[in-house]
Amino acid sequence: QVQLQESGPGLVKPSETLSLTCAVSGYSISSGYYWGWIRQPPGKGLEWIGSIYHSGSTYYNPSLKSRVTISVDTSKNQFSLKLSSVTAADTAVYYCARVHSSGYSYHDAFDIWGQGTMVTVSS
Amino acid sequence: DIQMTQSPSTLSASVGDRVTITCRASQSISSWLAWYQQKPGKAPKLLIYKASSLESGVPSRFSGSGSGTEFTLTISSLQPDDFATYYCQQYNSYSPSLTFGGGTKVEIK
């Protein structure tokens, strides 16, 4: 079955860039679907960060757009998140996920999620 | 941006109770709404999509209804495994963002 696994540093210093990767198994990213990043600060709700298609088309949350870059590497069957100029407010569990439908839109629910990775921003 | 408001934020209930959670959108989202269940330390699990469609494998005691700006998630008979936090999410194509509600925690009474 399709599985997603996030990886990356658990601790990032303020003003630096947070970098995470989501490895996909059981499905080829090149075959379709939008793939997304969602985060959840400790004890708080969920926030969509952005989504990407295998072609490289990206869509970002306007509130984060100036700091976010999502990219895809189809040869490695993975996609990545970079968030620049981080502050303590970016401390959160970061999830990668796949949308529910194989249509050509990022406007969708997320039906397959990674387990999440905790990233703390602190000096 | 479309804002999603859930109520109540916390709900105390007993096994066997019928439970209803409400999600309101700041503008019409047609039926483009999903519901998730999240347990501590786990990723959210999709329960309902397109407001009322039950995701494969989800027990039939879960149901969703509504359209436009007001939506409900109903658990017909609360089971021990259902104590968790529930989130709604809008995915209307007129909004550049996907947005989630603030969550409803279902606790044991």
Image (cartoon, helix red, strand yellow):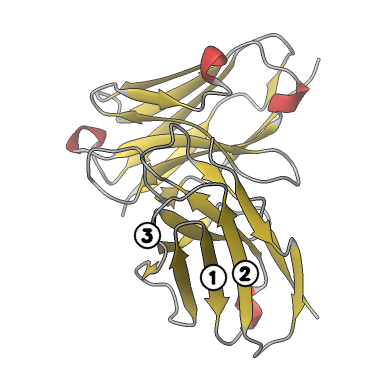
Q: Nearer the viewer, residue B34 or A51?
A: B34
Which comes sooner in the sequence, label 2 or label 3? 2
Identified at 61% across, 75% down, the residue is: B20
Q: Secondary structure at mark 3?
A: loop
Q: Quadrant of residue B7?
A: bottom right
Please report, as a chain letter, where disc 3 is located.
Answer: B
In the displayed structure, does residue A89 sit left or right of residue B76?
Answer: right
Residue carrying label 3: B50
Question: Disc 2, disc 3: CB below 8 Å?
Answer: no
Question: Label 2, label 1: how many angstroms apart (C-alpha)?
Answer: 5 Å
For label 3, count other residues whose C-alpha is less than 10 Å away and answer few (under 14), some (14-19) or many (20+).
many
Identified at 72% across, 65% down, the residue is: B8
Question: Disc 2, disc 1: CB below 8 Å?
Answer: yes
For label 2, count other residues whose C-alpha is less than 10 Å away and answer few (under 14), some (14-19) or many (20+).
many
Question: Label 2, label 3: how many angstroms apart (C-alpha)?
Answer: 16 Å
Q: Are marks 3 and 1 on the same chain?
A: yes
Q: Amino acid at mark 1?
A: Leu
Q: Are marks 2 and 3 on the same chain?
A: yes
Residue B21: image tag: 2
Which residue, as the protein is rendered here, is positioned at the far bottom? B16
In the displayed structure, does residue B37 sit left or right of residue B41?
Answer: left
Q: Quadrant of the N terminus of chain A?
A: bottom left
Residue carrying label 1: B73
